Amino acid sequence: MIGRIGENPLPESAPERAQPVDLISAPVFDAAGEIACTLSLHAFERPLALAEILRLGRRPEQACQTATRAAVRPPSAVPPAMLQQRAYHG
């Protein structure tokens, strides 16, 4: 682990310097605020510059924020068609 949640462990003073990256990960939280799961990118073949790390990290971050919002909204806010679709595919 190179950093803690909410902390930026990457050297902003050298944004073009490539860093070895093993994993870029973002959490999905449940209604209780606990981490329900994570979405991760891995298997990077080469070191990445800070700008590229941040760019790649935006996608899982946005997807996990969407999943968290869906997980924490009250069941009455979920359209019935979506519940049926979840039950069918789940």
Image (tube, helix red, strand yellow):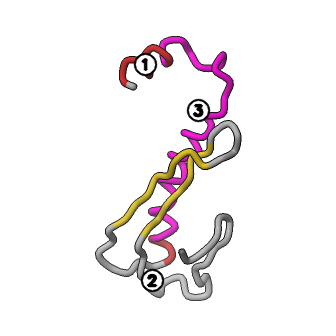
Question: Magenta segment range?
Answer: 53-82
Q: Is residue 38 above or below residue 69?
A: below
Front position among marks 2 and 1: 1
Local packing at callout 2 (Cα closer than 10 Å; few below 14, some 14-19, many 20+) is: some
- Disc assigned to residue 20: none
Horizontal side of 43 relative to 28 (left or right) equals left
Nearest the camera: 58 or 5?
5
Measured in 3D between alpha carbons, the distance from the residue under mark 2 to the one under mark 1, in whole angstroms, is 43 Å
- In contact (CB < 8 Å): disc 2 and disc 1: no
- Disc assigned to residue 87: 1
List x then y, in percent, for residue 64: 54, 47
Front position among marks 3 and 1: 1
Precedes in sequence: disc 3 or disc 2? 2
Precedes in sequence: disc 2 or disc 1? 2
Callout 2 amino acid: Gln
In which quadrant of the rendered image does the C terminus lie? top left
Measured in 3D between alpha carbons, the distance from the residue under mark 3 to the one under mark 1, in whole angstroms, is 15 Å
Residue at numbered disc 2: 19
Residue at numbered disc 3: 70
Q: Is residue 15 magenta?
A: no
